[in-house]
Amino acid sequence: MAQAIQTFSISAPGFYGLNTQDSPLDLASGFALVATNCIIDQYGRIGSRKGWTRVNSTSGNLGANDIGVIHELVQTDGTLTILFAGNNKLFKLGTNNVVTELTYGGGGSAPTITASNWQCASLNGITYFFQNAHDPLIYDPAVSTTTYRRVSEKSGYAGTVPSANLAISAFGRLWVANSTTDKTTITFSDLLTGYVYTGGTSGSLNVNQVWPNGADEVQALAAHNGFLFIFGKRQILVYQGATTPSTMSLYDTIGGIGCLGRDTVQTTSTDVIFLSNSGVRSLMRTIQEKSAPERDLSKNVRNDLMTAVASQTLANIKSVYSEREGFYLLTMPVGQSVYCFDTKVQLQDGSSRVTTWDSIAPTAFLSRRSGELYIGKTGYVGTYTGYSDYQTSYRMLYYTNNADLGNVNQTSILKKISAVVIGGTNQTVTIKWGFDFKSNYLSANATIPLQGVAQYGIDEYGANATTLSYYSDGIALNTLTVSATGSGKVVQTGYELVINGAQLSIQKIEIQAKNGKIA
């Protein structure tokens, strides 16, 4: 008797993001083994990331050099200024987004700038630039909109500003740390005056004797909900009452977990996210769950992530949190990859849904007050938008995990594979399938029609017999179907296409198969 064809469905494919950590046989169907140039969209579907386009049309004196930092100065009157650094110079985006170099406007010789890896902090309408072994610099538009000068040249300057590598603006003052000669002292300015470091409410905090597990160095700073967080390499200090530094006190210490890079720390409305020696961590969750330190946002990709981190210059790893896009991005400059941690939904174990990008290669990030996401590129400030990488296509790849189709001891004979996709007009999707953990995939192509929607009752939903199109809540859905061959106990399918101007998401996968012999 002929075996009946059975249909196996995966709804919301890729909903759980990547999992390269656990055994593929134990994974739920919502996990992916490959998710490249993908995001998890607002409806929980695996889809293509956005691309980028240039903000400035010409590079000016930035030339063909990487941007090391991008910062937005918000003045008290609402004026917004984009500042950035590259080619060992400071710049702003002027009228019509023209790259305008800031020149030295102080007295005497200009400071020597040998790198562009500044940390920027704004306070009371002024932006401060801090970088190890460099004079701290200041951009004060009330004095000049075209020049910069040393902090020490600011009118009213008092005390000594450290030549620090770390700087944050929090609780109405600057907090700076990590100079070439002092890795354990946090210096804070007077209230609203980031150039006053003596008198008033300015002061310093030396944490050399406070580390719970012995000597350490301050690697990063963060502030949240009245707490000051001081990250060492392998431990974290939490100070409460930081709104009044003279009376703040040590609230908690966390041993065994530290921060690997200054620019990996991002503050959200409810949390602080950072790259630790054991993966990407949630600071608030770490405090709450110190008894379960293995729980981290990168749990499902931890080994791959930390292998990539091992080859990086830690100072060059950048990150950003975008509230509008709902993700935390972490760059791996060596290899030009980006890890995307979805922050819209956490998985049951507290980890994040993760995808990777392999062809956008940002050198800096800025999440603007407007919600717009800026990225640094060689010679240009870019904005994260559209679906091409500045007029260049990129390839999206999504592969399911390996799974049996109902009975692990019985072979499945594939007949058809269907994918319900959204968007992607006139793009060809390569559908691949393989068996029993082997990488020699079979494949077939299906093209999404140029006309996004066909009408019911006309040529069986459209002229292409392998593609059905219709509207769903105002969104064009297309069902792509290919004939499949071959058999095996365990099946994996993959979906690849070139993104070149149109978004695509995958809503559902259906596999039609017959039961074969039982092993």
Image (cartoon, rainbow, N blue to C red):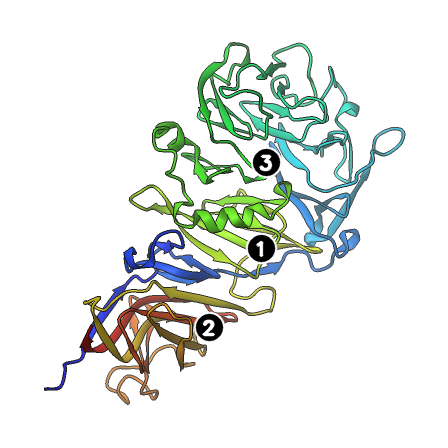
Q: Residue at x 67, y 45 (%)?
A: 68
Label 2 element class: strand
Label 1 element class: strand
Image coordinates of residue 346 in percent, x first then y, are 34, 45
Q: Tag 2 or tag 3, which sits nearer the N-term?
A: 3
Image coordinates of residue 165 in percent, x first then y, are 67, 31
Q: Residue at x 14, y 81 (%)?
A: 4
In the rendered image, the vertical position of residue 382 relative to residue 501, given as above or below:
above
Determine the CA span between mark 3 and mark 2: 36 Å
Q: Amino acid at mark 3?
A: Arg
Q: Tag 2 or tag 1, which sits nearer the N-term?
A: 1
Q: Amino acid at mark 1?
A: Thr
Q: Is residue 81 visible?
A: no
Query: Which residue in the structure is indicated by mark 3?
Result: 262
Image coordinates of residue 393 in percent, x first then y, are 56, 70
Q: Residue at x 58, y 44 (%)?
A: 318
Query: Which residue in the structure is indicated by mark 1?
Result: 383
Q: On the picture, is 423 further left or further right than 394?
A: left
Determine the CA span between mark 1 and mark 2: 23 Å
Q: Amino acid at mark 2?
A: Leu
Q: On the picture, is 489 further left or further right than 379?
A: left
